[in-house]
Amino acid sequence: MSILEHLKTVILYKFYVPVLVGKARYAADGIKASVKHKVQEVGKLDHPKKRGEYSTGQLFLHKIFGYRGIILFSWKPVVINRDLPITKSKSYLINKIQQMPEMDDDIFLKKRRYYYQVLIDNRDIDHTRATTEPATFIITQNRNKSLYAIPALDYVSHDDIIPYMSTEKTPFQHDLLKRFFIHVPNNDPQYLGHAALRTWKQWNETWLETTRVITETTQNVKITVMPFYLGEKTNHTYWWRYCVRIQNQGVKSLKLKGRLVRLYNGSSNYLQTLRGKKELSEQDVVLDKANPAYQYTSHVTLDVPVAYAWGSMSVEREDGHTFDCKIPLFTLDCVSDSEMM
């Protein structure tokens, strides 16, 4: 039974987490927990917001990946659904026949949605299938370029936020917590953003924010891509990271076998191909009802300021049949160093 199914099964406000966490298993009153795990209360669930945005400092449980998180701030990127063309132009029909992606995002349904920059609780890092490797970026100081990394940073959709009030003495653990927040136990939210958080956002928003989130579904497998520009490593050498989430929306389990991504420049000239399964931290990642999604981060360095990328994820069914799921076309573009400062 998945975390979400647990929450739908009971009408309760308390939820518990294992002291010795296995696969991010959660138990609630009235649900028998595994005898191998001791559980303890960590908080009281609140109702998800249907309108408006969550506040800085809001504690939450991730609906899909199950980790505890805290909201830094919100963004409102354009979400492009490449399953829903508004108009089927001649180029769209030709590309579909040739099995090539449509380059024009304007023909697809686009909506602005709230997304949140969040920190992941240190105690849950080893037990989630979300990206937990440090988020890297480049900054320029006194003409010197330095590589920085922020640990356990994620980018989360509004629909994946389940807010809660913590009942723990130490509600949240992260190396940056005291730098960014002031703990006010009886307040709602229980953490207030420090001035340092606002300053940090202003100085780093270019690499923190993505203006586009792109989705596409193939045979009940939804793939979401979020690209981020990180900076210019050297003269005319540009660096991006992109986050890919694969979610099984069907009832049968699937196994991820590897990915292939092709890169083209702004003139549609081929640049390179990225292939393999190094981003899959497990030998074989299985997507089933208990763990329907997996998310990884990849990096790419190019000598052009604008590029396009798309590809496929190889997936295996329970009967051994394999098929390719589309990794939707996404744009890699950059801004100048002066805009990043």
Image (cartoon, helix red, strand yellow):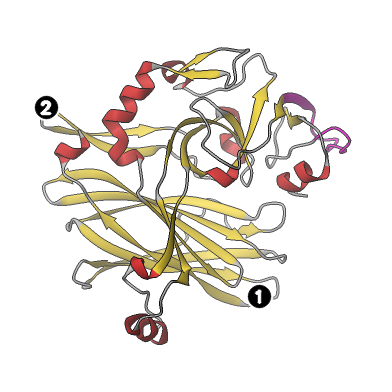
Q: Is residue 161 in view?
A: yes
Q: Please indicate whether residue 118 sits to the left or right of residue 317 in the image.
A: left
For the residue labelled by badge 1, is the local secondary structure a helix, a strand or a loop? Answer: loop
> How many numbered discs sit on the rendered protein?
2
- For residue 167, which quarter of the picture? top right
**Residue 247 lies in quadrant:** bottom right
Q: Residues within 10 Å of mark 1 (few under 14, many from 20)?
A: few
Residue extending farthest front: 51
Answer few, some or many: residues within 10 Å of disc 2's Cα (few below 14, many 20 plus, some between 14 and 19): few
- Which badge, 1 or 2, is on the more N-terminal residue? 2
Q: Are marks 1 and 2 in contact (CB under 8 Å)?
A: no
Label at residue 320? 1
Q: Which residue is mark 2?
A: 142
Instruction: Please identify the quarter of the rendering in which residue 318 is found.
Output: bottom right
Gap in Å between the C-alphas at discs 1 and 2? 56 Å
- Look at the image and say whether residue 290 sits in the magenta stretch: no
Q: Position of residue 319 (x, y in %)?
A: 70, 75
Amino acid type shown at disc 1: Gly
Q: Amino acid at mark 2?
A: Asn
- Give whichever of 334, 138 is nearer the camera: 334
As helix, strand or loop, the secondary structure at mark 2 comes to: loop
- Residue 38: in magenta span: yes
On screen, residue 68 above or below 255:
above
* Left or right for 186, reference 102: right
Range of the magenta residues? 28-42
